[in-house]
Image (tube, rainbow, N blue to C red):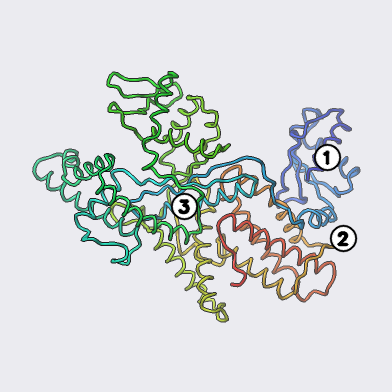
Amino acid sequence: MNFIIAETQKAILELYKEEVAEGVINLQETRKEFEGQVTIVVFPVTKLSKKSPEQTANEIGEYLVQNVTDVTKFNVVKGFLNLSIAESYFLNQFNNEILADDFGVFPANGKKVMVEYSSPNTNKPLHLGHVRNNLLGYSVSELLKAYGYDVVKVNLVNDRGIHICKSMLAWQKWGNGETPESTGLKGDHLVGKYYVIFDKEYKKEIEVLKADGQTEEEAKKNAPLIKDAQIMLQQWEAGDMAVVSLWKTMNEWVYAGFNVTYKNLGVDFDKFYYESNTYLLGKGTVEEGLAKGVFFKKEDGSVWIDLTADGLDQKLVLRADGTSVYITQDLGTAEMKYDDFNMDESIYVVGNEQDYHFKVLFLILEKLGKTWAKGLHHLSYGMVDLPNGKMKSREGTVVDADELIESMVTTAREKTEELGKTNDFSEEEKELLYKNIGLGALKYFLLKVEPKKRLLFNPAESIDFQGNTGPFIQYTYARIKSLLSKADYKFAINDAQFSGISEVELEMILLLAKYPSEIEVAANAYSPASLANYLYELAKVFNKFYHEVPPIVKTEEGQEKQFRLNLCKKTADIIHTGMLILGITSPERM
C-alpha cells in the first residue's frame, strides 16, 4: 500500500506546509480489534502539526477520505489513524498483482552467498542435532535462492583427528573384519558402533588405573587405549600406508551411510570440503598476520593475537611446535572458500556452543584486512531436546537420525490409517504419502522455531492434522487441490468488479499480499521460522474461509465463483512454493 505513504506526504504538505521523507510515514497492519486495514502512526508528525496526536490523526484522516478514492473511512485510536480501504482496491490488487505468474518471484540480485551446513564427524551417524542443522542450512539456502541470490551449499566434513582414530582402533581390536555388507549395518552406524565400544573400554582402563592410585586426570592420559589412538593419529599424519588405507575404507563406509540419510532428509550440497585436505591450511595466514603485526610470538615460539581491547581474550593461533589449532585451519579454510567462489556473503550454520569461536574467527579476518570478512555470518542455533532429556553420542544414547526418520514415517502411517482416508491409494502411493507426512511433520516442527532458540522436539505432537504442524498445512493444500478438481477449475481473471466480498475473503487477500515481504523478511533474518508460521496462518485462514463461505463447487457460475476459485488456487500455489522452501513436499491427495 505504498500509495498511502505518497498520499499522506501530500496531506502533510497541504495541512502543515512541510515536506517529509517516506521514512517518516510509519504504516502498520490494523489490529484485528479495530476497523480498517492499514494504520498510520502519527506521533512523528506531531512535531510538524504542533497539535495532539488525536487531532493530527483526525486532520490527516479527513484529508485522505476527501482526496483519495480508495480511502473510504477512518477512525482514530490515540495516535493511530486506522484507514478503511475500498473493496475495489483489493480486488484490483488480487487480479493484477497477486494472480500474476511472477508474484513473489524476486529477480537475481547479482550476489553470491555460500551456506555451509551439516559438517559431520566421520566417527558416528547423524543425530537429531544434525537433523536441525541440515534442515536449517537447506531451508536458508532455498530462502536465499527465492530472494534472488546465487547460492552455493557446502559441507565441511570433519574426517580426521583423534575421534576417527578411536573408531579405527576399536575396529582393529574388536571388529573381526566386520563390514557394512557382512553385518547389514549402514556404514556410519557400523563405525559409530566402534566409537561407542572405544569409549566403554577406555572407561574400564581409567577405572583400573584409578584403582592403582592414579588421579582421574592421570588415568585419562595414561590409559593404553588413548595412547594407542594418539600414536595412530601421528601415523596418519606421517602418511603410514596401513593406517591411511584403513582410514579411507572406514570413511567410505561412513560417506555411503551419510548419503542415504541426506537423501531421506531431502538435503543436498554443491561442494564438499574435507578437513583432511584443509587441516594444514592457515599457516600462511599466520605468517601474514605476523608480518602485519596482527599476531605476536611468545618466547616459547607460539603465535597469538591479543583481542582484549575488543572485549575478548588472547587467542592462540599456532602452537610452539608449529602445529595448527582449530582457529588456524578455519582461517585458512575461510580464505580457500573465498578464493574458490568469490562470494559476497558466507553463512556458517553451527550450534550456539561455537558462538565465541566465530566471533574470534571473523574478528581476526577483519584485522588481517580481508575485505570479504564483513560478509561472514554465524547462523547460531540452539540444541534440540527430547521429552526424556539430552543426547550423548559417546554413550550410545544418541537419537539417531535414521531411526528418527523411520519412526516419523511409522507414526504418520498409524495416524493416517486411523483416519481411514487412504483406502483407495495403491501401496506405493500410501508409502510415499506416509514419508511425505512424516518428514513434513519433522521438518516443520524443527523449522517453525527461531534458530537461536533451544527447542523441545515432541514427535507425537508434531504429527497432528490440527494445529501449527506440517501435516495441517499439507492437509489444507490437499483439500484445496480436491476442491479445485471437483470444480473443474480453469484459470481466468475477472476484469469486471462485483461487490460483497466477505471479511474472510478480504483477510485472505491481505495475507496473500504479504507473501513477497515474508520471503524478504525471512531471507534477511536467515530464518525460515517466520515463513513457516506465515504458511500456518494462511492455511488457518483458508480453513476459516472453507467453513464460512457457501460451498464453492455448488455456487452458480459467474464472477464470484471464479474469484473464489482463483483465491483457492493462489493460496495452494503459495503453500506449495513456501513449503518447498522449507524442504517439505505437499501431497495432492491425503
Q: Can you say whether 480 is above or below 215 in the image?
A: below
User: What residue is shown at x 29% (from left), y 46% (from top)?
Assistant: 163
Q: Quadrant of residue 295?
A: top left
User: Number of marks in the image?
Assistant: 3
Please tell me which residue is depicted at 50% across the width and 67% down the height of the picture: 435
Q: CA distance from mark 1 to mark 3?
A: 50 Å
* Quadrant where the C terminus is found in the figure: bottom right
Q: Which amino acid type corresponds to the residue marked 3 in the rendered image? A: Arg
Residue hosting label 1: 58
Q: Residues within 10 Å of mark 1 (few under 14, many from 20)?
A: many
Write down the residue under mark 2: 495
Nearer to us of marks 1 and 3 is 3
Q: Where does the image place residue 237, in percent across and percent down from the top left?
A: 28, 40
The answer to whether marks 2 and 3 mark residues whose Cβ atoms lie closer than 8 Å is no
Position of 138 relative to 346 (above/below): below
Q: Nearer the viewer, residue 344 or 77?
A: 344
Few, some or many C-alpha atoms within 10 Å of disc 2 (few <14, some 14-19, many ≥20)? few
Identify the mark nearer the N-term, 1 or 3. Answer: 1
